[in-house]
């Protein structure tokens, strides 16, 4: 993978990026096949996109004029650059936003206001809290005590899965979570070296669960904040932290444990699945890191209290009225305070993914322009105008879920995919008889599947290239995706129709 690909909205620390750049243990033939497959997929999806755009143009009686036309041109050029060029995603997003300002579609004040948007500050505060938790050593200790009791491969994969679900609330980034738990995988790989199939299954399991469980929290991925903000702009109401938790966490838990069974069945034979294993807590200790045994240190106790308090305040916002972004900033101040914190503020800010924050601000401006100018409505009604009237809700939802699941093949950034899809989905949902929030949430949940190629997601790329351990090849990901893609899409559809309405998110308005 090229350096340009690694630079795209990177949230990995330098050490993790160095590991991601290590040579991949795959054959040249596998790499060639992966590249050929990617080009074929790009061509197929590109052709479908052109057909869809042509259909949109053909189905419209009136041409686009003014701001809507300008916005649509900028939007199409941005998507083309994300898909077919090696330009940094943030660079493309900023360029698109500046072009909209110069064209007069959005004002200068509106553009710069996105940098001060509450979602940007919420994410920044959460990353500073995560830096403090990581420095304290609490994450290593928690992983060791959750995973060590396993005595069989099936117990191990499900304990690993449960531990990874918990990390959704500790680190607000899939790539950051991958870097955080990589040492845990390396410890398991050293201890279980006599079971190479189980090691390969774990290498596949870690990024798979990290990506699928991100939907459990509003802070699980930047795409979630994009979705909430687009809904707020279009309908006047976004999705709060506690609402996202109620809706997303059940899907995260179910999809994660289902995927654990799939991974174990695909990559470990019967003899490996029946093997007995023995793990000790001290196996997870790292040189120079805080100990994982004994009583909690002062720093670990404070980190645990900080995380519990922050999550508790986020979940009880209706009771106390403190905005989640203010809670995150208060937590960041505590995590970096001279006497109570585990990390200096300057160091914590250096670890923050500034490229991601700028990308988020720029895509918020692009999404706002698509919605306010009418371009999203025009494009949605033209390309998918058939999904309207009685009986269109379920077919529309199926198309949205399939498109959201497949789009990772061409748009690798999860936030970029939401910036592309969510304004269109929200604009068309009312005509199809679907609540915009339900359609947007289903689309964002389905976008959590991005496992087909090593380049499809940064956690996958990181675990595909691990020093001293042979993990998996591109063909293993294709094998996994053939089973996991329809399963995860089916779970999202099932939750949309049966579970989320019970939890307060009805499919119809």
Image: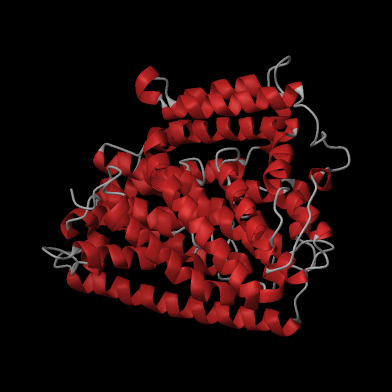
Q: How many marks?
A: 0
Q: Position of residue 81 (x, y in %)?
A: 50, 63
Q: Residue furthest top?
A: 339
Q: Position of residue 250 (x, y in %)?
A: 43, 48
Above or below: residue 27 compared with residue 133: below
Quarter residue 395 falls in: bottom left
Above or below: residue 498 compared with residue 383: above
Q: Is residue 112 visible?
A: no
Quarter residue 189 falls in: bottom right
Q: Residue furthest right?
A: 287
Q: Is residue 81 visible?
A: yes
Side (left or right) of 54 relative to 445? left
Side (left or right) of 1 relative to 8? right
Side (left or right) of 113 relative to 18? left
Q: Residue at x 54, y 42 (%)?
A: 358
Above or below: residue 24 compared with residue 393: below
Q: Position of residue 298 (x, y in %)?
A: 75, 21
Q: Quadrant of the N terminus?
A: bottom right
Q: Residue at x 56, y 72 (%)?
A: 480
Side (left or right) of 299 relative to 436? right
Q: Position of residue 257 (x, y in %)?
A: 53, 57
Q: Residue at x 56, y 43 (%)?
A: 168
Judging depth in this view, the residue of 282 and 51 nearest the camera is: 282
Asked which colour scheme the image uses, the reply is: secondary structure
């Amino acid at each position: 993978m090229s350096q340009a690909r690694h630079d795209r909205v990177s949230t990995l620390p330098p050490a993790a990026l160095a590991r991601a750049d290590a040579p991949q243990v795959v054959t040249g033939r596998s790499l060639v096949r992966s590249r050929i497959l990617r080009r074929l997929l790009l061509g197929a999806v590109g052709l479908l996109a052109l057909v869809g755009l042509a259909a949109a143009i053909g189905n419209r009686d009136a041409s686009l004029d003014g701001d809507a036309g300008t916005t649509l041109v900028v939007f199409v050029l941005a998507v083309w650059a994300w898909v077919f060029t090696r330009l940094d995603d943030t660079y493309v997003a900023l360029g698109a936003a500046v072009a909209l300002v110069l064209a007069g579609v959005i004002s200068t004040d509106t553009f710069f206001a996105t940098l001060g948007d509450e979602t940007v500050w919420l994410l920044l505060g959460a990353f500073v809290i995560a830096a403090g938790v990581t420095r304290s050593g609490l994450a290593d200790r928690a992983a060791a005590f959750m995973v060590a009791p396993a005595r069989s491969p099936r117990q191990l994969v499900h304990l690993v899965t449960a531990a990874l679900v918990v990390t959704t609330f500790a680190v607000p980034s899939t790539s950051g979570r991958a870097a955080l738990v990589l040492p845990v995988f390396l410890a398991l790989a050293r201890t279980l070296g006599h079971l190479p199939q189980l090691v390969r299954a774990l290498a596949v399991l870690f990024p798979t669960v990290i990506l699928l469980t991100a939907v459990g929290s509003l802070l699980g991925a930047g795409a979630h904040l994009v979705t909430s903000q687009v809904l707020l702009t279009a309908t006047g109401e976004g999705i709060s932290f506690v609402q996202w938790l109620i809706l997303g966490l059940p899907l995260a838990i179910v999809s994660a444990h289902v995927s654990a069974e799939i991974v174990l069945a695909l990559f470990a034979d019967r003899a490996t699945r029946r093997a007995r294993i023995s793990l000790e807590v001290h196996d997870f200790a790292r040189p120079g890191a805080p100990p994982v045994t004994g009583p909690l240190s002062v720093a670990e106790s404070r980190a645990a209290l900080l995380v519990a308090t922050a999550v508790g305040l986020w979940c009880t916002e209706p009771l106390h009225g403190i905005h989640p972004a203010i809670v995150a900033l208060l937590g960041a101040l505590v995590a970096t305070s001279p006497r109570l914190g585990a990390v200096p503020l300057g160091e914590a800010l250096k670890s923050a993914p500034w490229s991601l924050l700028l990308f988020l601000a720029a895509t918020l401006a692009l999404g706002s322009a698509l919605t306010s100018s009418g371009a999203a409505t025009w494009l949605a009604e033209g390309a998918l105008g058939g999904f309207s009237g009685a009986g269109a809700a379920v077919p529309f939802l199926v198309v949205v879920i399939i498109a959201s699941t497949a789009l990772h093949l061409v748009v690798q950034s999860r936030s970029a995919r939401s910036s592309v899809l969510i304004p269109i989905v929200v604009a068309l949902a009312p005509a199809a008889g679907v609540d915009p929030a339900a359609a947007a949430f289903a689309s964002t949940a389905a976008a959590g599947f991005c496992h087909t190629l090593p380049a499809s997601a940064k956690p996958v790329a990181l675990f595909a290239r691990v020093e001293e351990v042979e993990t998996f090849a591109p063909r293993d990901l294709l094998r996994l995706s053939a089973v996991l893609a329809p399963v995860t899409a089916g779970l999202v559809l099932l939750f949309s129709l049966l579970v989320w309405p019970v939890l307060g998110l009805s499919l119809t308005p």
